[in-house]
Amino acid sequence: SQQGEEDPQALSIQEGENATMNCSYKTSINNLQWYRQNSGRGLVHLILIRSNEREKHSGRLRVTLDTSKKSSSLLITASRAADTASYFCATLLYTGTASKLTFGTGTRLQVTL
Amino acid sequence: DAGVIQSPRHEVTEMGQEVTLRCKPISGHDYLFWYRQTMMRGLELLIYFNNNVPIDDSGMPEDRFSAKMPNASFSTLKIQPSEPRDSAVYFCASSPGQGVDGANVLTFGAGSRLTVL
């Protein structure tokens, strides 16, 4: 079963605009990760935010985490055509002996010239 | 490092046939994961290994699916007999460790696209 639900399911923007994707989840987590998947490829890790962090930046990426609302957002600033891909959030729950990384449903981002 | 290597990239087979998917994880990664991706169900964890030992196989759909990891550099996912509903992209991924830090970040292979007719 999927832990995360992403919103919107699909997003189309023009190059240079910002793209915001949201992820909601249901249970406690230890960290939340965002991955990108280009068409026909495997997923690539983008950024990780721990449960005790509220915001994190990496280049043009900005991730926020609100554990009280069980939600996260990924902002891509100044988007480029090469950012066209599907974006997935993944939540990690670590029990001390085992961990499980569960992926959301994904947001398909289309960046047009 | 060449990353996580999966084979075959594409497999078309007929219902009832045996399918074997292969994976070579990144050297030094102690954890190996098998995921399945479909439009209807998204990305599902099937099974994962730690140091070649299966830890959680609760995602394996049914007895037709089996996975092995005979050594640190090789794993297989076998479907016997295959059915049309098994059609999906199967991903292998590996990570250096677990815990709440970045050790649990996954590196994915390119996937094996399976079509069962």
Image (cartoon, coloured by chain):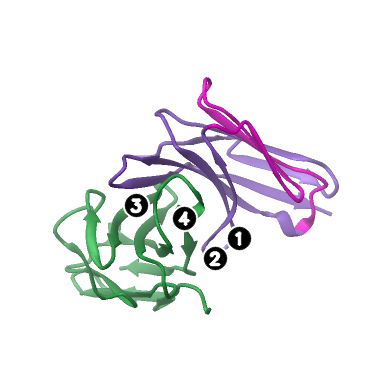
Of A85 and B72, the residue lying toward us: B72
Residue stretch in magenta: A52-81
Relative placement, left or right, of A4 versus A77 is left
Q: How far apart in space, not on screen, are marks 4 and 1 (Cα)?
A: 23 Å
Residue B43 shows which numbered tag? Answer: none
Q: How far apart in space, not on screen, are marks 3 and 2 (Cα)?
A: 17 Å
Q: Which residue is mark 3?
A: B45
Q: Amino acid at mark 4?
A: Ala
Colour purple maps to chain: A
Which residue appears at 21% of the width and 74% of the height? Answer: B18
- SS class of the residue under badge 3? strand
State yes or no: residue A62 in magenta.
yes
Of A70 and B87, the residue lying toward us: A70
Q: Which residue is mark 4?
A: B103
Task: List x then y, in percent, for residue B116.
Answer: 31, 67
Relative placement, left or right, of B62 versus A74 is left
| Disc number lying in front (3 or 1) | 3
What chain letter is assigned to the residue under label 2? A
